[in-house]
Image (tube, coloured by chain):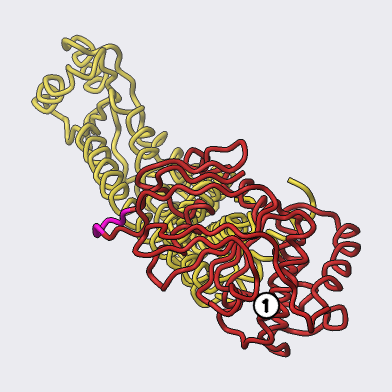
Protein backbone atom coordinates (compact mmCIF):
# COMPACT_ATOMS: atom_id res chain seq x y z
CA UNK A 1 0.00 0.00 0.00
CA UNK A 2 1.51 3.26 -1.02
CA UNK A 3 1.45 6.53 0.83
CA UNK A 4 -0.97 8.21 -1.52
CA UNK A 5 -3.50 5.45 -1.25
CA UNK A 6 -3.21 5.44 2.52
CA UNK A 7 -3.68 9.17 2.58
CA UNK A 8 -6.74 8.95 0.36
CA UNK A 9 -8.29 6.18 2.45
CA UNK A 10 -7.79 8.02 5.74
CA UNK A 11 -8.97 11.31 4.32
CA UNK A 12 -12.15 9.71 3.05
CA UNK A 13 -12.68 7.86 6.31
CA UNK A 14 -12.50 11.04 8.39
CA UNK A 15 -14.61 12.92 5.89
CA UNK A 16 -17.26 10.22 6.21
CA UNK A 17 -17.03 10.30 9.97
CA UNK A 18 -17.54 14.03 10.07
CA UNK A 19 -20.42 14.02 7.62
CA UNK A 20 -22.16 11.30 9.54
CA UNK A 21 -21.18 12.39 13.03
CA UNK A 22 -24.51 11.90 14.81
CA UNK A 23 -24.66 8.24 13.89
CA UNK A 24 -20.97 8.08 14.65
CA UNK A 25 -21.60 9.28 18.19
CA UNK A 26 -24.35 6.72 18.59
CA UNK A 27 -21.94 4.02 17.49
CA UNK A 28 -19.23 5.20 19.84
CA UNK A 29 -21.78 5.28 22.64
CA UNK A 30 -22.92 1.75 21.98
CA UNK A 31 -19.41 0.39 21.82
CA UNK A 32 -18.49 2.22 25.01
CA UNK A 33 -21.63 0.88 26.73
CA UNK A 34 -20.77 -2.69 25.85
CA UNK A 35 -17.22 -2.28 27.04
CA UNK A 36 -18.16 -0.52 30.26
CA UNK A 37 -20.53 -3.30 31.16
CA UNK A 38 -17.90 -5.82 30.17
CA UNK A 39 -15.36 -4.05 32.37
CA UNK A 40 -17.81 -3.85 35.23
CA UNK A 41 -18.60 -7.54 35.05
CA UNK A 42 -14.93 -8.34 34.69
CA UNK A 43 -14.10 -6.37 37.84
CA UNK A 44 -16.91 -7.94 39.82
CA UNK A 45 -16.03 -11.46 38.80
CA UNK A 46 -12.33 -10.91 39.38
CA UNK A 47 -12.98 -9.46 42.80
CA UNK A 48 -15.40 -12.12 43.91
CA UNK A 49 -13.00 -14.76 42.71
CA UNK A 50 -10.20 -13.10 44.54
CA UNK A 51 -12.12 -12.85 47.79
CA UNK A 52 -13.09 -16.49 47.40
CA UNK A 53 -9.47 -17.39 46.80
CA UNK A 54 -8.19 -15.49 49.80
CA UNK A 55 -10.88 -17.01 51.95
CA UNK A 56 -10.07 -20.42 50.60
CA UNK A 57 -6.65 -20.23 52.15
CA UNK A 58 -8.33 -20.29 55.52
CA UNK A 59 -10.63 -22.91 54.19
CA UNK A 60 -9.03 -25.92 55.82
CA UNK A 61 -8.88 -24.13 59.12
CA UNK A 62 -11.57 -24.07 61.69
CA UNK A 63 -11.72 -21.26 64.19
CA UNK A 64 -12.90 -22.29 67.64
CA UNK A 65 -13.86 -19.42 69.92
CA UNK A 66 -13.44 -20.12 73.59
CA UNK A 67 -15.98 -18.95 76.17
CA UNK A 68 -15.06 -16.20 78.61
CA UNK A 69 -13.66 -17.29 81.96
CA UNK A 70 -12.09 -20.56 80.90
CA UNK A 71 -8.70 -20.76 82.62
CA UNK A 72 -5.38 -21.61 81.13
CA UNK A 73 -5.14 -25.21 82.26
CA UNK A 74 -8.54 -25.91 80.79
CA UNK A 75 -7.42 -24.27 77.60
CA UNK A 76 -4.32 -26.37 77.46
CA UNK A 77 -6.45 -29.49 77.95
CA UNK A 78 -8.79 -28.42 75.18
CA UNK A 79 -5.89 -27.93 72.82
CA UNK A 80 -4.65 -31.40 73.58
CA UNK A 81 -8.10 -32.93 73.09
CA UNK A 82 -8.60 -31.12 69.82
CA UNK A 83 -5.30 -32.44 68.53
CA UNK A 84 -6.46 -36.01 69.15
CA UNK A 85 -9.57 -35.71 66.99
CA UNK A 86 -9.51 -37.65 63.76
CA UNK A 87 -8.56 -35.49 60.76
CA UNK A 88 -6.86 -32.79 62.73
CA UNK A 89 -3.36 -31.95 61.64
CA UNK A 90 -2.41 -29.33 64.14
CA UNK A 91 -3.89 -26.98 66.64
CA UNK A 92 -2.84 -23.39 67.08
CA UNK A 93 -3.88 -20.93 69.71
CA UNK A 94 -4.39 -17.20 69.52
CA UNK A 95 -4.87 -15.29 72.74
CA UNK A 96 -7.45 -12.55 72.81
CA UNK A 97 -4.64 -10.02 73.23
CA UNK A 98 -2.98 -11.28 70.08
CA UNK A 99 -6.30 -11.05 68.21
CA UNK A 100 -6.76 -7.44 69.31
CA UNK A 101 -3.23 -6.48 68.28
CA UNK A 102 -3.76 -8.10 64.91
CA UNK A 103 -6.95 -6.16 64.46
CA UNK A 104 -5.17 -2.95 65.39
CA UNK A 105 -2.55 -3.72 62.81
CA UNK A 106 -5.16 -4.33 60.16
CA UNK A 107 -6.95 -1.12 60.92
CA UNK A 108 -3.74 0.84 60.72
CA UNK A 109 -4.28 4.55 61.20
CA UNK A 110 -7.76 4.02 62.47
CA UNK A 111 -6.60 1.70 65.22
CA UNK A 112 -6.97 4.48 67.81
CA UNK A 113 -10.65 3.70 67.66
CA UNK A 114 -9.87 0.43 69.40
CA UNK A 115 -7.91 2.13 72.16
CA UNK A 116 -11.13 3.27 73.74
CA UNK A 117 -12.22 -0.25 74.52
CA UNK A 118 -12.41 -0.86 78.26
CA UNK A 119 -12.30 -4.58 77.88
CA UNK A 120 -11.01 -6.77 75.11
CA UNK A 121 -14.17 -8.07 73.43
CA UNK A 122 -12.36 -10.63 71.34
CA UNK A 123 -12.31 -14.28 72.41
CA UNK A 124 -9.40 -16.63 72.84
CA UNK A 125 -9.29 -18.68 69.69
CA UNK A 126 -8.06 -22.09 68.65
CA UNK A 127 -7.14 -22.50 65.02
CA UNK A 128 -7.68 -26.10 64.11
CA UNK A 129 -5.82 -27.11 61.01
CA UNK A 130 -7.44 -29.98 59.13
CA UNK A 131 -5.58 -32.73 57.32
CA UNK A 132 -8.11 -32.46 54.59
CA UNK A 133 -11.20 -30.43 53.88
CA UNK A 134 -13.33 -33.57 53.79
CA UNK A 135 -12.98 -33.86 57.59
CA UNK A 136 -14.49 -30.45 58.01
CA UNK A 137 -18.06 -31.41 58.87
CA UNK A 138 -17.13 -34.19 61.28
CA UNK A 139 -14.58 -32.18 63.14
CA UNK A 140 -16.85 -29.16 63.33
CA UNK A 141 -19.60 -31.25 64.94
CA UNK A 142 -17.19 -32.73 67.45
CA UNK A 143 -15.69 -29.38 68.34
CA UNK A 144 -19.10 -27.91 69.01
CA UNK A 145 -19.75 -30.63 71.60
CA UNK A 146 -16.81 -29.56 73.81
CA UNK A 147 -17.44 -27.67 77.02
CA UNK A 148 -16.17 -24.15 76.92
CA UNK A 149 -16.54 -23.77 73.19
CA UNK A 150 -18.55 -20.71 72.36
CA UNK A 151 -18.64 -20.94 68.60
CA UNK A 152 -17.10 -22.87 65.75
CA UNK A 153 -16.64 -21.09 62.51
CA UNK A 154 -15.87 -22.68 59.25
CA UNK A 155 -15.65 -20.77 55.97
CA UNK A 156 -16.72 -23.38 53.49
CA UNK A 157 -20.26 -22.10 53.09
CA UNK A 158 -19.14 -18.56 52.59
CA UNK A 159 -16.58 -19.60 50.04
CA UNK A 160 -19.05 -21.75 48.18
CA UNK A 161 -21.58 -18.96 48.08
CA UNK A 162 -18.98 -16.61 46.69
CA UNK A 163 -18.03 -19.08 44.00
CA UNK A 164 -21.66 -19.59 43.07
CA UNK A 165 -22.21 -15.84 42.86
CA UNK A 166 -19.10 -15.35 40.75
CA UNK A 167 -20.28 -18.14 38.47
CA UNK A 168 -23.71 -16.62 38.12
CA UNK A 169 -22.31 -13.18 37.38
CA UNK A 170 -20.01 -14.74 34.79
CA UNK A 171 -22.82 -16.55 33.02
CA UNK A 172 -25.16 -13.60 33.13
CA UNK A 173 -22.31 -11.39 31.97
CA UNK A 174 -21.50 -13.58 28.98
CA UNK A 175 -25.09 -13.40 27.76
CA UNK A 176 -25.43 -9.72 28.44
CA UNK A 177 -22.20 -9.00 26.61
CA UNK A 178 -23.13 -11.18 23.66
CA UNK A 179 -26.43 -9.37 23.26
CA UNK A 180 -24.79 -5.98 23.61
CA UNK A 181 -22.09 -6.96 21.12
CA UNK A 182 -24.75 -7.83 18.58
CA UNK A 183 -26.49 -4.53 19.20
CA UNK A 184 -23.28 -2.55 18.71
CA UNK A 185 -22.37 -4.41 15.56
CA UNK A 186 -25.84 -3.63 14.30
CA UNK A 187 -25.56 0.06 15.16
CA UNK A 188 -22.11 0.35 13.58
CA UNK A 189 -23.18 -1.46 10.45
CA UNK A 190 -26.06 0.98 10.20
CA UNK A 191 -23.74 3.93 10.60
CA UNK A 192 -21.48 2.61 7.88
CA UNK A 193 -24.51 1.82 5.77
CA UNK A 194 -25.46 5.47 5.81
CA UNK A 195 -22.03 6.49 4.59
CA UNK A 196 -22.08 3.78 1.97
CA UNK A 197 -25.43 5.05 0.74
CA UNK A 198 -24.24 8.65 0.85
CA UNK A 199 -21.35 7.72 -1.35
CA UNK A 200 -23.12 5.13 -3.43
CA UNK A 201 -22.63 6.94 -6.73
CA UNK A 202 -18.99 7.51 -6.08
CA UNK A 203 -18.50 3.88 -5.13
CA UNK A 204 -20.34 2.64 -8.20
CA UNK A 205 -18.18 4.84 -10.32
CA UNK A 206 -15.08 3.54 -8.60
CA UNK A 207 -16.15 0.02 -9.33
CA UNK A 208 -16.67 0.81 -13.00
CA UNK A 209 -13.30 2.49 -13.18
CA UNK A 210 -11.75 -0.59 -11.65
CA UNK A 211 -10.54 0.87 -8.39
CA UNK A 212 -8.96 -1.73 -6.14
CA UNK A 213 -10.81 -3.06 -3.15
CA UNK A 214 -8.54 -1.10 -0.88
CA UNK A 215 -9.81 2.16 -2.31
CA UNK A 216 -13.41 1.09 -2.22
CA UNK A 217 -13.52 -0.63 1.15
CA UNK A 218 -10.60 0.96 2.92
CA UNK A 219 -12.33 4.15 4.03
CA UNK A 220 -15.28 2.28 5.51
CA UNK A 221 -13.11 -0.17 7.39
CA UNK A 222 -11.01 2.68 8.77
CA UNK A 223 -14.21 4.44 9.73
CA UNK A 224 -15.29 1.37 11.70
CA UNK A 225 -11.90 1.06 13.35
CA UNK A 226 -11.86 4.72 14.39
CA UNK A 227 -15.32 4.39 15.92
CA UNK A 228 -14.14 1.29 17.78
CA UNK A 229 -10.99 2.93 19.11
CA UNK A 230 -12.80 6.04 20.32
CA UNK A 231 -15.47 3.89 21.94
CA UNK A 232 -12.82 1.81 23.71
CA UNK A 233 -11.00 4.78 25.15
CA UNK A 234 -14.25 6.37 26.24
CA UNK A 235 -15.14 3.16 28.04
CA UNK A 236 -11.77 2.91 29.74
CA UNK A 237 -11.87 6.53 30.89
CA UNK A 238 -15.36 6.16 32.29
CA UNK A 239 -14.45 2.92 34.03
CA UNK A 240 -11.33 4.38 35.66
CA UNK A 241 -13.10 7.55 36.64
CA UNK A 242 -16.11 5.67 37.99
CA UNK A 243 -14.06 3.16 39.94
CA UNK A 244 -11.87 5.77 41.54
CA UNK A 245 -14.82 8.02 42.28
CA UNK A 246 -16.67 5.27 44.09
CA UNK A 247 -13.66 4.00 45.95
CA UNK A 248 -12.86 7.46 47.32
CA UNK A 249 -16.52 7.96 48.12
CA UNK A 250 -16.62 4.68 50.00
CA UNK A 251 -13.32 5.09 51.76
CA UNK A 252 -14.44 8.52 52.93
CA UNK A 253 -17.41 7.00 54.63
CA UNK A 254 -16.38 3.54 55.69
CA UNK A 255 -12.72 3.99 56.28
CA UNK A 256 -12.16 1.09 58.58
CA UNK A 257 -14.27 -1.32 56.63
CA UNK A 258 -12.62 -0.48 53.38
CA UNK A 259 -9.09 -0.53 54.65
CA UNK A 260 -9.84 -4.01 55.93
CA UNK A 261 -11.19 -4.98 52.56
CA UNK A 262 -8.48 -3.21 50.65
CA UNK A 263 -6.29 -6.27 50.55
CA UNK A 264 -9.07 -8.16 48.79
CA UNK A 265 -10.02 -5.59 46.16
CA UNK A 266 -8.48 -5.72 42.73
CA UNK A 267 -8.41 -2.14 41.56
CA UNK A 268 -9.16 -1.12 38.02
CA UNK A 269 -5.70 0.46 37.91
CA UNK A 270 -4.11 -2.91 38.53
CA UNK A 271 -5.58 -4.50 35.41
CA UNK A 272 -5.49 -1.35 33.32
CA UNK A 273 -3.07 -2.69 30.74
CA UNK A 274 -5.10 -5.82 30.19
CA UNK A 275 -8.31 -3.80 30.07
CA UNK A 276 -6.91 -1.52 27.38
CA UNK A 277 -5.82 -4.49 25.28
CA UNK A 278 -9.14 -6.30 25.71
CA UNK A 279 -11.19 -3.18 25.05
CA UNK A 280 -9.26 -2.13 21.97
CA UNK A 281 -9.44 -5.62 20.55
CA UNK A 282 -13.18 -5.84 21.07
CA UNK A 283 -13.82 -2.25 20.02
CA UNK A 284 -11.84 -2.56 16.82
CA UNK A 285 -13.37 -5.97 16.21
CA UNK A 286 -16.89 -4.57 16.47
CA UNK A 287 -15.94 -1.71 14.17
CA UNK A 288 -14.48 -3.92 11.46
CA UNK A 289 -17.28 -6.43 11.70
CA UNK A 290 -19.88 -3.67 11.40
CA UNK A 291 -18.16 -2.26 8.31
CA UNK A 292 -17.81 -5.63 6.66
CA UNK A 293 -21.45 -6.46 7.22
CA UNK A 294 -22.73 -3.29 5.61
CA UNK A 295 -20.17 -3.47 2.81
CA UNK A 296 -21.24 -7.00 2.04
CA UNK A 297 -24.84 -5.90 1.93
CA UNK A 298 -24.43 -2.77 -0.10
CA UNK A 299 -21.42 -3.33 -2.28
CA UNK A 300 -22.58 -6.20 -4.37
CA UNK A 301 -19.82 -5.96 -6.93
CA UNK B 1 -10.84 -9.99 -29.24
CA UNK B 2 -14.25 -10.18 -27.56
CA UNK B 3 -16.30 -13.29 -28.03
CA UNK B 4 -19.76 -14.21 -26.82
CA UNK B 5 -20.44 -17.91 -27.27
CA UNK B 6 -24.08 -19.00 -26.95
CA UNK B 7 -24.61 -16.67 -24.04
CA UNK B 8 -27.95 -16.63 -22.24
CA UNK B 9 -28.97 -14.71 -19.17
CA UNK B 10 -32.12 -15.72 -17.39
CA UNK B 11 -32.99 -13.76 -14.27
CA UNK B 12 -34.41 -15.34 -11.17
CA UNK B 13 -37.93 -14.37 -12.09
CA UNK B 14 -37.54 -16.40 -15.30
CA UNK B 15 -37.16 -13.27 -17.39
CA UNK B 16 -34.95 -14.08 -20.34
CA UNK B 17 -32.79 -11.01 -20.87
CA UNK B 18 -30.58 -12.38 -23.62
CA UNK B 19 -30.75 -15.76 -25.32
CA UNK B 20 -28.14 -17.69 -27.22
CA UNK B 21 -26.03 -14.71 -28.17
CA UNK B 22 -22.94 -15.41 -30.23
CA UNK B 23 -20.93 -12.39 -31.20
CA UNK B 24 -17.37 -11.76 -32.19
CA UNK B 25 -15.80 -8.33 -31.96
CA UNK B 26 -12.39 -7.67 -33.42
CA UNK B 27 -9.81 -5.40 -31.87
CA UNK B 28 -10.15 -1.86 -33.16
CA UNK B 29 -13.73 -2.33 -34.27
CA UNK B 30 -16.51 0.26 -33.87
CA UNK B 31 -19.74 -1.46 -33.11
CA UNK B 32 -23.27 -0.27 -32.48
CA UNK B 33 -25.64 -2.36 -30.46
CA UNK B 34 -29.18 -1.28 -31.19
CA UNK B 35 -32.63 -2.33 -30.11
CA UNK B 36 -35.58 -1.09 -28.13
CA UNK B 37 -35.33 -0.82 -24.40
CA UNK B 38 -35.64 -4.28 -22.94
CA UNK B 39 -34.09 -5.86 -26.01
CA UNK B 40 -31.02 -6.88 -24.01
CA UNK B 41 -28.48 -4.15 -24.77
CA UNK B 42 -27.80 -3.30 -21.16
CA UNK B 43 -27.63 -6.95 -20.21
CA UNK B 44 -25.02 -7.52 -22.88
CA UNK B 45 -22.93 -4.66 -21.52
CA UNK B 46 -23.35 -5.80 -17.94
CA UNK B 47 -22.21 -9.26 -18.94
CA UNK B 48 -19.13 -7.88 -20.60
CA UNK B 49 -18.31 -5.74 -17.56
CA UNK B 50 -18.87 -8.75 -15.34
CA UNK B 51 -21.52 -7.01 -13.35
CA UNK B 52 -23.58 -10.13 -13.86
CA UNK B 53 -22.68 -13.64 -14.92
CA UNK B 54 -24.38 -15.48 -17.78
CA UNK B 55 -26.69 -18.35 -17.04
CA UNK B 56 -25.21 -20.20 -19.97
CA UNK B 57 -22.40 -19.76 -22.45
CA UNK B 58 -18.97 -18.21 -22.21
CA UNK B 59 -17.56 -14.77 -22.78
CA UNK B 60 -13.95 -14.26 -23.76
CA UNK B 61 -12.04 -11.04 -23.54
CA UNK B 62 -8.68 -11.51 -25.21
CA UNK B 63 -6.88 -14.11 -23.13
CA UNK B 64 -9.48 -14.10 -20.37
CA UNK B 65 -12.56 -16.18 -19.78
CA UNK B 66 -14.70 -13.41 -18.35
CA UNK B 67 -17.10 -15.76 -16.60
CA UNK B 68 -14.21 -17.26 -14.67
CA UNK B 69 -12.55 -14.08 -13.46
CA UNK B 70 -12.24 -14.20 -9.71
CA UNK B 71 -13.96 -11.56 -7.64
CA UNK B 72 -10.72 -10.00 -6.50
CA UNK B 73 -9.52 -9.69 -10.08
CA UNK B 74 -12.62 -7.97 -11.41
CA UNK B 75 -11.24 -4.51 -10.68
CA UNK B 76 -8.10 -5.29 -12.61
CA UNK B 77 -10.16 -6.55 -15.55
CA UNK B 78 -12.36 -3.44 -15.60
CA UNK B 79 -9.37 -1.20 -15.93
CA UNK B 80 -8.97 -2.55 -19.41
CA UNK B 81 -12.40 -1.23 -20.32
CA UNK B 82 -13.44 2.40 -20.19
CA UNK B 83 -17.10 3.03 -19.54
CA UNK B 84 -19.22 6.02 -20.60
CA UNK B 85 -22.62 6.41 -18.96
CA UNK B 86 -25.76 7.89 -20.37
CA UNK B 87 -26.09 10.13 -17.33
CA UNK B 88 -22.37 11.08 -17.22
CA UNK B 89 -21.92 10.18 -13.52
CA UNK B 90 -19.58 13.00 -12.69
CA UNK B 91 -18.87 13.68 -9.04
CA UNK B 92 -20.62 16.99 -8.39
CA UNK B 93 -18.22 18.27 -5.77
CA UNK B 94 -15.16 17.85 -7.94
CA UNK B 95 -14.06 20.05 -10.81
CA UNK B 96 -13.64 18.73 -14.33
CA UNK B 97 -9.95 18.31 -13.69
CA UNK B 98 -10.51 16.55 -10.37
CA UNK B 99 -13.12 14.26 -11.84
CA UNK B 100 -10.63 12.98 -14.35
CA UNK B 101 -7.82 12.89 -11.81
CA UNK B 102 -10.07 10.78 -9.58
CA UNK B 103 -10.11 8.00 -12.18
CA UNK B 104 -6.34 8.07 -12.35
CA UNK B 105 -5.81 8.15 -8.61
CA UNK B 106 -7.95 5.07 -8.15
CA UNK B 107 -5.73 3.06 -10.44
CA UNK B 108 -2.18 4.21 -10.09
CA UNK B 109 -0.45 7.18 -11.31
CA UNK B 110 1.85 9.63 -9.65
CA UNK B 111 0.74 13.24 -9.33
CA UNK B 112 3.28 14.08 -11.97
CA UNK B 113 1.68 11.67 -14.37
CA UNK B 114 -1.74 13.08 -13.61
CA UNK B 115 -0.62 16.65 -14.22
CA UNK B 116 0.86 15.64 -17.53
CA UNK B 117 -1.95 13.47 -18.87
CA UNK B 118 -5.06 15.44 -18.01
CA UNK B 119 -4.39 18.47 -20.23
CA UNK B 120 -3.81 16.14 -23.18
CA UNK B 121 -7.11 14.39 -22.68
CA UNK B 122 -8.95 17.64 -22.05
CA UNK B 123 -7.73 19.09 -25.31
CA UNK B 124 -8.74 15.91 -27.09
CA UNK B 125 -12.34 16.31 -25.94
CA UNK B 126 -12.19 20.06 -26.47
CA UNK B 127 -12.50 21.18 -22.87
CA UNK B 128 -9.07 22.67 -22.23
CA UNK B 129 -10.58 25.91 -20.96
CA UNK B 130 -13.07 24.25 -18.60
CA UNK B 131 -10.70 22.33 -16.31
CA UNK B 132 -11.70 24.32 -13.23
CA UNK B 133 -15.44 24.21 -13.83
CA UNK B 134 -17.82 22.14 -11.74
CA UNK B 135 -20.15 19.70 -13.52
CA UNK B 136 -23.26 21.79 -12.86
CA UNK B 137 -21.66 24.70 -14.66
CA UNK B 138 -21.37 22.66 -17.85
CA UNK B 139 -23.88 21.78 -20.56
CA UNK B 140 -24.94 18.18 -21.07
CA UNK B 141 -22.64 17.75 -24.03
CA UNK B 142 -19.71 19.14 -22.08
CA UNK B 143 -20.44 16.87 -19.15
CA UNK B 144 -20.49 13.89 -21.46
CA UNK B 145 -17.12 14.94 -22.81
CA UNK B 146 -15.72 14.99 -19.32
CA UNK B 147 -17.14 11.53 -18.82
CA UNK B 148 -15.45 10.38 -22.02
CA UNK B 149 -12.18 11.97 -20.95
CA UNK B 150 -12.45 10.11 -17.67
CA UNK B 151 -13.08 6.84 -19.51
CA UNK B 152 -10.04 7.14 -21.76
CA UNK B 153 -7.58 8.66 -19.31
CA UNK B 154 -6.28 5.27 -18.22
CA UNK B 155 -5.85 4.20 -21.85
CA UNK B 156 -8.23 1.24 -21.92
CA UNK B 157 -8.25 -1.22 -24.83
CA UNK B 158 -12.00 -0.98 -25.13
CA UNK B 159 -14.54 1.76 -24.60
CA UNK B 160 -18.11 0.81 -23.84
CA UNK B 161 -20.72 3.53 -24.04
CA UNK B 162 -24.30 2.97 -22.92
CA UNK B 163 -26.55 5.43 -24.75
CA UNK B 164 -23.95 8.18 -24.52
CA UNK B 165 -26.08 10.55 -26.55
CA UNK B 166 -29.37 9.56 -24.99
CA UNK B 167 -29.78 12.84 -23.16
CA UNK B 168 -28.34 15.08 -25.87
CA UNK B 169 -29.72 16.86 -28.92
CA UNK B 170 -28.73 15.90 -32.46
CA UNK B 171 -26.02 18.47 -32.91
CA UNK B 172 -24.34 17.76 -29.60
CA UNK B 173 -24.62 14.05 -30.30
CA UNK B 174 -22.74 14.54 -33.54
CA UNK B 175 -19.93 16.25 -31.66
CA UNK B 176 -19.78 13.45 -29.15
CA UNK B 177 -19.71 10.90 -31.97
CA UNK B 178 -16.79 12.73 -33.46
CA UNK B 179 -14.84 12.20 -30.29
CA UNK B 180 -15.67 8.51 -30.26
CA UNK B 181 -14.54 8.24 -33.87
CA UNK B 182 -11.31 9.92 -32.92
CA UNK B 183 -10.79 7.47 -30.08
CA UNK B 184 -11.52 4.56 -32.41
CA UNK B 185 -9.05 5.86 -34.97
CA UNK B 186 -6.32 5.60 -32.35
CA UNK B 187 -6.96 1.89 -32.14
CA UNK B 188 -9.40 1.62 -29.27
CA UNK B 189 -12.31 -0.76 -29.70
CA UNK B 190 -15.60 1.09 -29.26
CA UNK B 191 -18.86 -0.62 -28.37
CA UNK B 192 -21.85 1.68 -28.23
CA UNK B 193 -25.38 0.82 -27.24
CA UNK B 194 -27.93 3.21 -28.65
CA UNK B 195 -31.41 3.45 -30.06
CA UNK B 196 -30.61 6.63 -31.96
CA UNK B 197 -31.30 5.66 -35.60
CA UNK B 198 -30.07 8.99 -36.82
CA UNK B 199 -26.69 8.40 -35.29
CA UNK B 200 -26.32 4.97 -36.81
CA UNK B 201 -27.42 6.06 -40.25
CA UNK B 202 -24.98 8.91 -40.27
CA UNK B 203 -22.15 6.60 -39.36
CA UNK B 204 -21.75 3.63 -41.53
CA UNK B 205 -20.56 1.13 -38.94
CA UNK B 206 -21.21 -2.43 -37.94
CA UNK B 207 -24.61 -2.66 -36.36
CA UNK B 208 -25.82 -5.51 -34.19
CA UNK B 209 -29.54 -5.38 -33.63
CA UNK B 210 -31.18 -7.09 -30.69
CA UNK B 211 -34.79 -7.96 -30.26
CA UNK B 212 -36.20 -9.75 -27.23
CA UNK B 213 -32.76 -10.89 -26.22
CA UNK B 214 -31.70 -12.31 -29.56
CA UNK B 215 -29.50 -10.95 -32.33
CA UNK B 216 -31.73 -10.39 -35.33
CA UNK B 217 -29.30 -8.50 -37.53
CA UNK B 218 -25.54 -8.14 -37.71
CA UNK B 219 -24.66 -5.80 -40.53
CA UNK B 220 -21.01 -5.27 -41.21
CA UNK B 221 -20.23 -2.20 -43.20
CA UNK B 222 -17.02 -0.30 -43.41
CA UNK B 223 -15.97 3.13 -42.27
CA UNK B 224 -17.75 6.05 -40.85
CA UNK B 225 -18.51 8.81 -43.26
CA UNK B 226 -17.65 11.95 -41.45
CA UNK B 227 -20.22 14.56 -42.10
CA UNK B 228 -19.12 17.11 -44.70
CA UNK B 229 -19.73 20.06 -42.41
CA UNK B 230 -17.44 18.64 -39.77
CA UNK B 231 -14.33 18.65 -41.90
- At x 64%, y 54%, the residue is B81
Residue A111 location, x and y as percent?
A: 49, 51
Q: Is residue B135 above or below residue A103?
A: below
The percent position of residue A57, horizontal first and vertical second, equals: 36, 27
Is residue A111 shown to the viewer in this render? no
In the picture shown, does residue A33 fall above or below B64? Answer: below
Q: Is residue A67 magenta?
A: no
Left or right of A230 on screen, residue B36: left
Horizontal arrangement in the rendering, residue A43 relative to residue B65 (left or right): left
Quarter holding the C terminus of chain B? bottom right
Report x, y in % for residue A224: 54, 59
Name the one closer to the observer, A242 or B107: B107
Measured along the vertical axis of the image, is residue A15 above or below residue B66? below
On the rendered structure, is A203 left or right of B177?
Answer: left
Stretch of the chain drawn in magenta = B10-14
Q: Answer yes or no: is residue B16 visible.
A: yes
Chain drawn yellow in the picture: A
Q: Looking at the colours in the rendered structure, which chain would you say is drawn in red?
A: B
The quarter of the displayed image where residue B92 is located: bottom right
Q: Residues within 10 Å of mark 1 (few under 14, many from 20)?
A: many
Q: Nearer the viewer, residue B214 or B14?
A: B214
Our reading of the magenta stretch's main secondary structure is loop
Identify whether A202 is placed above or below A283: below
Residue appearing at x 51%, y 53% in the figure: A283
Depth check: give the residue in front, A61 or B26.
B26
Q: Quadrant of the N terminus of chain B?
A: top right
Q: Which type of secondary structure does the marked residue at label 1 adopt?
A: helix
* Residue at (87, 60) in percent of width and height: B111
Number of marks in the rendered image: 1
Q: Residue under circle 1?
A: B144
Q: Picture coordinates of residue B21 (x, y %)?
A: 41, 50
Residue B13 within the segment the image draws in magenta? yes
Amino acid sequence: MNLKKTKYIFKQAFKNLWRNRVMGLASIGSIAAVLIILGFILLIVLNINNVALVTKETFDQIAVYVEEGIDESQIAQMGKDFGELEGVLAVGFETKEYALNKMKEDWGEDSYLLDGLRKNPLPNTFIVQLKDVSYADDVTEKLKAFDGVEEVSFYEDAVNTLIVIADFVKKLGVWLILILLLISVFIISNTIKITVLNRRKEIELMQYIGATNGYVRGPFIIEGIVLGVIGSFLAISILIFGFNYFSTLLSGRYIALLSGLASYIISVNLILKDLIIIFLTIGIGIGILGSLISLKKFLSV
Amino acid sequence: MIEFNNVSKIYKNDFVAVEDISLKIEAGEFLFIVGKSGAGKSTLIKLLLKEINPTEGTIRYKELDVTKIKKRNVAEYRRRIGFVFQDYRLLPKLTVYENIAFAMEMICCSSKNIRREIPIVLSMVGLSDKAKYYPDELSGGEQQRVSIARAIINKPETIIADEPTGNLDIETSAEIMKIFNEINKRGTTVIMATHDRELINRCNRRVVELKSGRIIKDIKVGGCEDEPKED
